[in-house]
């Protein structure tokens, strides 16, 4: 398991939405920087879509980071949605019940009840 992660913002076809595409591992070493990136995005954009389609590993630190961002978004009246989880990442989110909270999937529903962006 490597401990590298990149998180880059890109435009979305949906107004007021930014996509944060995450690549690499969500682990204890990488999650602090991901958390900072996602919190900044949530503070600046009404809707943030976190794309996990290129994430290769996720542990409890990743789950915690996603939940922290979802709660922060809800607290400031913004929306945080997650898409693209697969493999071990999807399994970890499913086994912890976080998938139900975040309503993962390309056609799922976001943490605040809207359809997934992107």
Image (cartoon, rainbow, N blue to C red):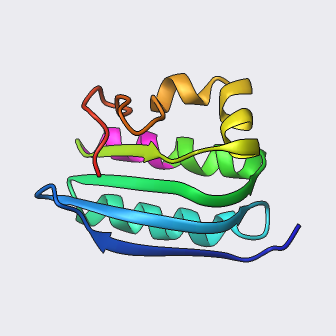
Q: Residue at x 45, y 62 (%)?
A: 38
Above or below, comparing residue 51 to residue 89 in the picture = below
Magenta-span inclusion, residue 49: no
Residue at 56% over, 29% down = 99
The span shown in magenta is: 69-76
Viewed as shown, does residue 59 lie left or right of 43? right
The answer to whether 66 is drawn above or below residue 107 in the figure is below
Point 65% across, 59% down: residue? 55
Residue sitting farthest toward the right = 1
Closer to us: 88 or 66:
88
Q: Which residue is at the front of the view, 34 or 114? A: 114
Q: Quadrant of the N terminus?
A: bottom right
Could you say which is closer to the camera, residue 78 or residue 1?
A: 1
Q: Identify the residue at horizontal 64%, vertical 23% (top origin).
A: 97
Dividing the picture into quadrants, the one containing residue 15 is bottom left
25 left or right of 40 in image: right
Q: Quadrant location of residue 116? A: top left
Q: Position of residue 45 (x, y in %)?
A: 23, 61
Q: How many marks?
A: 0
Determine the main secondary structure of the stretch shown in magenta. Answer: helix
- The x and y percentages for residue 30 are 71, 69
Residue 118, given in percent of the width and then of the height, sits at 29, 52
């Amino acid at each position: 398991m490597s401990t590298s992660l990149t998180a880059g913002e890109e435009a979305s076809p949906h107004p007021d939405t930014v996509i944060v595409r995450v690549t690499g591992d969500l682990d204890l070493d990488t999650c602090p920087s991901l958390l900072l990136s996602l919190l900044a995005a949530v503070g600046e954009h009404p809707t943030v879509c976190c794309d996990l389609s290129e994430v290769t590993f996720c542990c409890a630190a990743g789950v915690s980071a996603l939940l922290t961002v979802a709660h922060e978004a809800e607290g400031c009246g913004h929306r945080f949605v997650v898409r693209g989880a697969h493999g071990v990442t999807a399994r970890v989110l499913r086994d912890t019940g976080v998938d139900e909270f975040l309503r993962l999937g390309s056609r799922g529903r976001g943490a605040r009840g809207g359809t997934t962006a992107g």
